[in-house]
Amino acid sequence: MFVDLRTPDTPAHAEADTADVVATMAPLLRQARDAGVAAIVDAGPMGVGRRADILHAVSEAARFPLVVPTGFSSDEQGADGRHRRHGGGRRVDQAACRCTGGDDQVLAPLLEMQEDGLPKQLLLSQDRGWYDPAQPQGGEPNHFHSLLKSFLPKVRSAGVGEATIEALTRLNPWRVFLR
């Protein structure tokens, strides 16, 4: 939502006028809500200009839930090749799959995972739109509803059932982020 990809030692790193960020990003959150998005988890890490105060102002202005991490975690890969994340006082082991690219490149692995009975263990994410204080007027923002308006229709057309879609878009995020 708010990302400064310059190095943290760059003058004015992560500095922006909160009102400018709100004016740019709040309408995008309202569009996401109107498209059916219930909340966004902004997983921007420290070091890329994460500003919880600005994100809170955007969330309040848009009247839209925005979840923002405020602590640290560390990642490592175990001897068994599984990804392990430490943070928040608990340890979570997870098999990690990162699929990038267009919708079609992500759809094939999703279908394979469905056949393997893994949808209960999957989260979908999208790396969309942010305000970059290094760019004039924060750069070119993107909408936050491509997952619902573009990707999920392709998932349905490929034969993924509504129970799996419900798990991917509602049940799994609820279970992971609200425990």
Image (cartoon, rainbow, N blue to C red):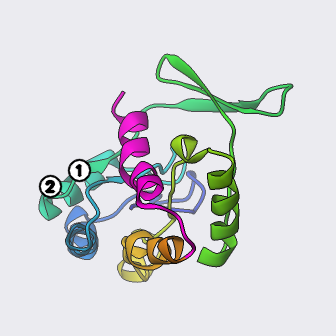
Q: CA distance from mark 2 to mark 1?
A: 6 Å
Left or right of residue 27: residue 111? right
Mark 1, secondary structure of its residue: helix
Queried whether the magenta region covers residue 171, the answer comes back as yes
Residue indicated by mark 2: 60
Residue stretch rendered in magenta on the structure = 158-179
Q: Position of residue 2 (x, y in %)?
A: 40, 61
Q: Amino acid at mark 1?
A: His
> Magenta part mainly helix, strand or loop?
helix
Residue 64, given in percent of the width and then of the height, sits at 19, 57
Residue 2's tag is none
Is 22 displayed left or right of 128 in the figure? left
- The residue that appears at 43% across and 75% down in the rendered structure is 146
Contact (Cβ within 8 Å) of mark 2 with mark 1: yes
Residue situated in front as seen by the camera: 76 or 123 = 123
Instruction: Check residue 148 for magenta coloring.
Output: no
Q: Which quarter of the figure is the C terminus placed in?
A: top left
Mark 2 is on which residue type? Glu
